[in-house]
Image (cartoon, helix red, strand yellow):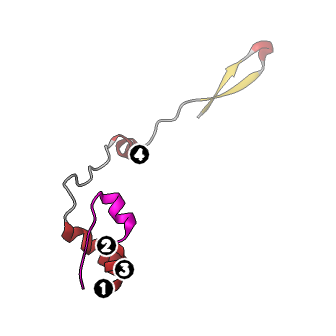
Amino acid sequence: MAKATTARKSRSVRRQARRVMPSSRRKNRRAPAPAAKTGPLTLGELIAAAFDTAGGEFLEVLRVVSSPQLSKALGRRIVLET
């Protein structure tokens, strides 16, 4: 709530008090971010993610997995044969 303070020449000046953050927001703010999975990515997980991305199209999965961008990101080249 705003409080009245007396300033020079007897004028009343409104002063805003500090409001306390609700406990639910305070609690959420202090919580650390959940740790992501830190283990290495397996080839099976990579192919499953490619199927999710490509919508189940096999040829599209082959194109995504063997793409130069993915090879550069992984640091390895993946070769799949049909």
Q: Residues within 10 Å of mark 2 (few under 14, many from 20)?
A: many
Residue 33 falls inside the magenta stretch: no
Is 12 above or below relative to 61?
Answer: above
Q: Position of residue 23 (x, y in %)?
A: 38, 42
Chain-order first, disc 4 or disc 2: 4
Residue holding disc 2: 65
Q: Position of residue 45 (x, y in %)?
A: 22, 68
Provide the secondary structure element on which disc 4 rests. helix
Badge number at residue 58:
1
Residue at left 23%, top 55%? 37
Badge number at residue 16:
none
Chain-order first, disc 4 or disc 3: 4
Q: CA distance from mark 1 to mark 2?
A: 11 Å
Cβ–Cβ under 8 Å for marks 3 and 2: no
* Quadrant assignment for the C terminus: bottom left
Residue holding disc 4: 25
Residue kind at label 1, given as amino acid type: Phe
Comparing marks 4 and 2, which lies closer to the viewer? Answer: 2
Q: CA distance from mark 4 to mark 1?
A: 46 Å
**51 and 79: which one is in front?**
79
Comparing marks 4 and 3, which lies closer to the viewer? Answer: 3
Chain-order first, disc 4 or disc 1: 4
Where is residue 77, by image quadrant?
bottom left
Residue kind at label 2, given as amino acid type: Val
* Quadrant assignment for the N terminus: top right
Chain-order first, disc 3 or disc 2: 3
